[in-house]
Image (tube, helix red, strand yellow):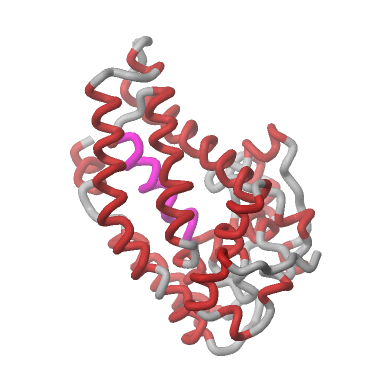
Amino acid sequence: MKTLEYLLSIDLNYFAIPLIAIFFALEHILGTQFNFQRRGHHFWNSFLFMVPFLIGNLFWAVIFVFCIEWLNQNEIGLFYLIELPVWLKLILGVMILDLATYWFHRISHLVPVLWRFHRVHHSDTTMDSSTYFRGHPIEVLFWFGSAPILMAAIFGLDLFTIGVYFLVLTPFLVIEHSNLRFPSWLDKTIGLVITTPNLHKIHHDQDQHYTDSNFADIFILWDRIFGTYTYKPAEQVKLGLAEFDEDKKQRFWYLLKSPFIRIDRKN
């Protein structure tokens, strides 16, 4: 437990950035699944999203921690009403947070104003491990960032459990976006429960039928239960959104302002 507490005391960026560096290097060494040029240019336009995110997080982190601590101090939530072992609360907490993110993610595809922000992440027509960075800071902080607060209010989750969830989630987010070939047998084995890279790539297909599927980050089980699971061979996936398939629409400044621009969907 002390080791886990130590890991949680480290900024997640110290885990994410080395992971991205490793997978970005592997994409060069092993070759990418989907070939594209100007990877340095692509990386830079994705990495720049870290700047407004870090600035916004200085403000949001204070609110986030205050809300969770207030809820915990007042013992609000289901887990304060029932006796469960710490390890079980931890496992259930991670699953609950992943389920909440599944629904927040699914809703962001259904509500037009939320989709305007979420499509920034889906805009990437040449996805690789650096796509981890590509998310509009307003959506990442204030929309997805509110899911743990809501779950803490309902279930009584604490900062430790939320920290474990993000520690587990971060490698998934990096690996799922990496532009590497993964064997299809993974999808037919652990892919029955866990979201594999191939299954997540389907979520980034330009065909809206597939874009609006496979929403889960860790447990693809949620998609199977709630009827949003789909499958196609990863090599048949055409990445991104057709309406963003221009060089100028892949640049950081355009993507940052794109939620405030009307861009009609092409499929």
Question: Image height check: is 169 above or below 265?
Answer: above
User: Left or right: where does residue 70 sit relative to residue 91?
Assistant: left
Q: Which image quarter is the C terminus in?
A: bottom right
Residue 169 magenta-highlighted: yes
Q: Is residue 99 left or right of residue 155?
A: right
Percent position of residue 179, x then y: 58, 71
Q: Would residue 88 be visible to someone looking at this image?
A: no
Query: Residue 174, percent across and down?
Result: 47, 61
- Displayed quadrant of residue 137: bottom left
Q: In the picture, residue 116 is in which quadrant?
A: bottom right
- Residue segment shown in magenta: 160-174
In this rendering, the answer to whether 83 lies above or below 224 is: above
Q: What residue do we see at 72% from left, 44% from top? A: 229
- Characterize the magenta stretch by its predominant secondary structure: helix
Given residues 18 and 69, the one toward you in this image is 69
Name the residue located 19 percent from the left edge and 46 percent from the top edge: 6
